[in-house]
Amino acid sequence: MSIFVDENTKVIYQGLTGSQGRFYGLRNRDYGTNVVGGTNPKKAGTDVDGIPIFANVGEAVAATGANASCIFIPAPGVRAAIMDAAEGGVEFIVCITEGVPAHDEAWFYNELKRDFPNVRLLGPNCPGIISPGKCNIGITAGEIAKPGGPVGIVSRSGTLTYQALYELKLQNIGVTTCVGIGGDPVPGTSFIDCLAAFEADPDTKAVMMIGEIGGSAEEEAAEFIKNNMSKPVVSYVAGVTAPPGKKMGHAGAIVSGGKGTAAAKMEALADAGVRVGKNPTEAGELMVEVVREHGWA
Amino acid sequence: MDLLEYQGKQFFATFGIPVSDGRAVTTVEDAVAAANAVGYPVVVKAQVHAGGRGKAGGVKLATNEAEVREHAGNILGLDIKGHITRILWIENASDIAEEYYASFTLDRSAKKHLGMLSKEGGVEIEQVAVDNPDAIAKIWIDPVDGLSADVCRAWVKAANLNADVTEDAVELLCKLYTAYVEGDADLAEINPLIVKTNGRVHALDAKVTLDDNAEFRHEWDEYATTQVRDAREEAAHAKGLQYVGLEGSVGIIANGAGLAMSTLDVVNQAGGEAANFLDIGGGANAEVMAGALQVINDDPSVKSIFINIFGGITRGEEVAKGIIGALEMVDITAPIVIRLDGTNAEEGRALLAPHLSERLQSKPTMLEAAATAVALAKKN
């Protein structure tokens, strides 16, 4: 099994007619994802390489039975696009767009919780999600992931996620689902949401969690792991050497007021029984150890 | 983007928050003219992106023209924690009865806006939080609900402010919340928020950080001109690169923010220090790579360069072509170590092979590449 998305997921691409949307939408379809439609109010009735375009998500859902959407709309339109998707009736929204204002993120996070409690938002500013061999929504290169299990991955960083997928593949270790939650201050889906889902997924035996500086999401995840996870977790936190007060690429990756340091996060995780690698390679090796110890691969 | 005090006050004023009458000036003569216009006594305040201005001698009271002339002359050019004072804010001095603290920011854990209010203002709020946490009244505001006057009134009462100013404080704090939300601020802070001897509340200082991601819906060009970046950051910014200047000698180029941060970490673990953080994004084509190499090459502290690329959708051979193309465009002085991994990494390395030398090495793993780059930096 996998979490959040699988071979039955049917996806609408909001912004499929744009250059990024088209490129990744078609790539995702080539991978095997059920790409059933796109939206663009000005181009309804046309198609992108055979994929029908609808005026909005509601019409797309009515026509195709889609249950997920993927957003490739520029930042100014993201708030409206997310509400279009929620009102249109999909249950899972993946927002790839980066540069969304923090006030918009805080607003739609709470608006979804209130009026659309069954809708899960992943992102914004995330690479997406892949359940290898079944469904790939977003910008992850599907070929670097080995299908199957026993490992689930959740990460705040895109390239480090790819690195993890690739290292596991080289060791012939498969992945149930790999979730990129994104590096923004208010991610729609948190580490804890993913850890809980992996804990409940029978095919996921161990979890790789990749964090970075800023905020307290890793510390909260450590608390959750300590109290709720029976499955082994391996972790890496990027940014040990990041200076305070400087944003390291991601809007959420900043050490401020002495809070959000990598050292504090690694300590909290280690205290929760997580095996913490000091670089991505070491974390990969630790996961290989865990998998081999248990004879899972 | 951090605003200077006077920009923060002008920002507040557009939302109807009471601030002192003042003028921003850059010369002694203009300072005198400003003081005459706003009326004595005035406060002469250095406008720099640094705290502790008062202790550094950057804030002075002046009761007449001669004093304005003297203080303005002393403060212009004053070095405050490495920031040279170029702008002064001359404002009418206030008669202070009480000093409070107020701020709004995003609580990332709660995913709601956090308002903090304290009757212990004029001091560092972090210190109040340690010494007397009960003196800070906090409220969490759901962005969908916003802040109503009733909720705000209960908050003001919880902070035990002088009861006479409750309604005035509620009005100001509601405006501050509006400024924070509609102005797309990451932080809107008033410290001190004063009660004047005439009983009115008033923002005596302004600390505002704006969310760069929201620039598309605001006119922030004038704020951008006073941002301080070092020359390297300025050059990188002009090329659209995600760059942060650091103190070390190993220049870093990586694709993806997480991998770039991780690259800094492994350089550190190998006993070296990074000269910068630089994320070139996903594509890594020749033009972007050349721009990145140019910025790194122009930094005199760089003694070696570590290019750390993981090919995802961008395949290894395309990355290699990008690097080779970039090397033809830029004349690089420091030796380069490349680690290329991911999709089609072997094909990429094969393309690089004929170009390799002492000056351009390729290593198969991140750790080996980091160790080599650090050794080269130390040798040079």
Image (spheres, coloured by chain):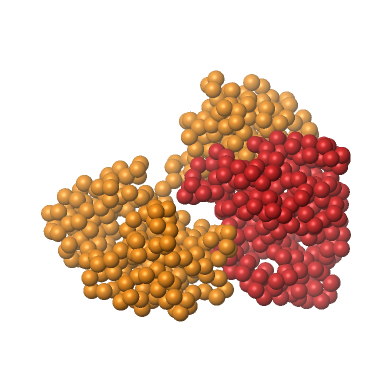
Chain colours: A red, B orange
Q: Horizontal placement of B190 versus B197: left or right?
A: right
**Residue B27 versus residue A120 in the image, above or below:** above
Give the x, y percent position of residue B198.
Answer: 23, 74
Give the x, y percent position of residue B102.
Answer: 40, 64
Task: Compare residues A95 and A255 and report the one nearer the observer.
Answer: A255
Quadrant housing residue B209: bottom left
Give the x, y percent position of residue B334.
Answer: 56, 27
Q: Horizontal placement of B118 versus A141: left or right?
A: left
Residue at image location 42% in from the left, 56% down from the top: B129
Give the x, y percent position of residue A51.
Answer: 83, 65
Q: Horizontal placement of A20 versus B223: left or right?
A: right
The answer to whether residue B114 of the structure is visible from this angle is yes
Q: Horizontal placement of B30 versus A252: left or right?
A: left
Residue at image location 81% in from the left, 69% down from the top: A66
Task: Compare residues A249 and B155 and report the one nearer the observer.
Answer: B155
**Residue A29 versus residue B52 in the image, above or below:** below
Residue at image location 27% in from the left, 62% down from the top: B23
Residue at image location 55% in from the left, 75% down from the top: B145
Task: Compare residues A247 and B51 and report the one nearer the observer.
Answer: B51
